[in-house]
Amino acid sequence: MLIAPVQFVLFFVTMLPANEKILSEGVDVAGIYDVDDSGIINANLYVAQNCPYPCEKPYYPVCGGDRINYKTFGNLCFFHMKVDCYPQYAEYTLQHNGTCACILQRVIGPCLAIVPSYYYDIDMGRCVFFEYGGCEGNTNR
């Protein structure tokens, strides 16, 4: 199964724990993000202020909430990561601006094909197998 890269917009977010930092325009950040079958977003992240080299760390999706008490922020998708670059360690929260595909319900579609697929189940917090019908549906697969 080929998974297309997912693009993210980074901007300032409030309501985070005191030990977390925000990736905002003031931080020199560039990255390539993609979602694998486990529902984890992998990234090659370059944080110029903290790391002299690229750091590859997982992003865990937390959709429609603030990761602590899951307050709803509408159709926003949050991702949490840890940057582990010697000698510094930092935690960051990224916010995906736009419709969050992983909060959408599974849609098999009206067609009769049987396409093995996965969708992110927000209640279970992981990707779940289903058989996609081959047409229509939504982007949560």
Image (spheres, helix red, strand yellow):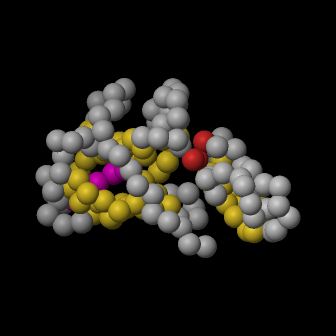
Which span of residues is magenta-colored?
A: 81-85
Image quadrant holding the N terminus, namely bottom right
> Is residue 140 among the parts visible in the rendering?
yes
Name which residue lies at 45% across and 57% down.
6
Q: Quadrant of residue 46?
A: bottom left
Query: How far across and how far down the image is residue 107, in percent?
Result: 74, 50
Q: Is residue 69 visible?
A: no
In the foreground, 25 or 126: 25
The quadrant where residue 15 appears: top left
Q: Residue at x 33, y 32 (%)?
A: 13
In the rendered image of this protein, does residue 12 appear above or below residue 47? above
In the displayed structure image, the side of residue 107 where residue 3 appears, left or right: left
When asked about the image quadrant of residue 111, the answer is bottom right
Residue 83 magenta-highlighted: yes
Q: What is the x, y in percent for residue 131?
A: 78, 63
Q: Position of residue 57 (x, y in %)?
A: 36, 60
Quadrant containing the C terminus in the rendered view: bottom right
The residue sitting at 18% across, 46% down in the picture is: 27
Identity of the residue drawn at 23% across and 53% down:
29
| Residue 21 at x, y percent in the picture | 26, 39
Q: On the rendered structure, is 40 left or right of 141?
A: left
Magenta includes 32?
Answer: no
Q: Nearer the viewer, residue 124 or 100?
A: 100
